[in-house]
Amino acid sequence: MDRKALLRMSSKEGKAEYKEKIVEGHVGIGDIVTRLCPSIVCPLEHFIMVCPRLQPRYYTISSSSTVHPKTIHITYALLESEKKNGGKFTGLCSGYLSSLSKGDMVRVFVRDSTFRLPKQPERPIIMIGPG
């Protein structure tokens, strides 16, 4: 892959090729600069400036604050799939969480929930969750 290929895939016309070769192939920016385009020369500070910031992953607390008043528990699924090149793709955050052991500490933030039960407790509700 070279400069022309990268420019083509970054254009409107190359959108399908980008999706096929980069997105579906789970090719990250690290793969591009080290494996696919090793001729790219860029000072580290410039490289860091152009890298997108890691976005937070939001997980739902799956434990009761009544039962566990000092801890929270989350439920997640480890994202793993095979890359087109035969390698293994592991989700960044779910992979990190799966590498932890019981009792390990994790830096998190809790945001206020918008979930509210009906004011009338006798009103029936349907609750649907992932998985």
Image (tube, helix red, strand yellow):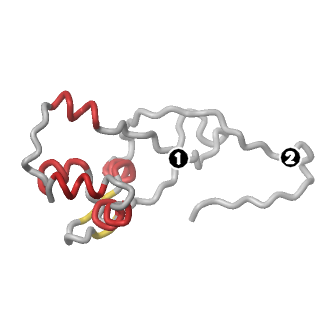
Marker disc for residue 118: 2
Give coordinates of residue 53: x percent, y percent. Answer: 36, 36
Give coordinates of residue 37: x percent, y percent. Answer: 13, 52
Q: Residues within 10 Å of mark 2 (few under 14, many from 20)?
A: few
Residue highlighted by disc 1: 59
Callout 2 amino acid: Pro
Between the C-alphas of marks 1 and 2, the distance is 23 Å
Answer left or right for 35 relative to 65: left
Q: Nearer the viewer, residue 126 or 64?
A: 126
Residue in view at x 36 percent, y 61 percent: 13
Residue in view at x 59 percent, y 40 percent: 68
Answer left or right for 58 relative to 9: right
| Marker count (numbered) | 2
In the image, farthest residue toward the top: 45
Looking at the rendered image, the quarter that the N terminus falls into is bottom left
**Considering only vertical position in the picture, is 5 above or below 41?**
below
Residue in view at x 11 percent, y 44 percent: 40
Residue in view at x 92 percent, y 53 percent: 122
Give coordinates of residue 120: x percent, y percent. Answer: 92, 46
Sequence-wise, which precedes: disc 1 or disc 2? 1
Callout 1 amino acid: Tyr
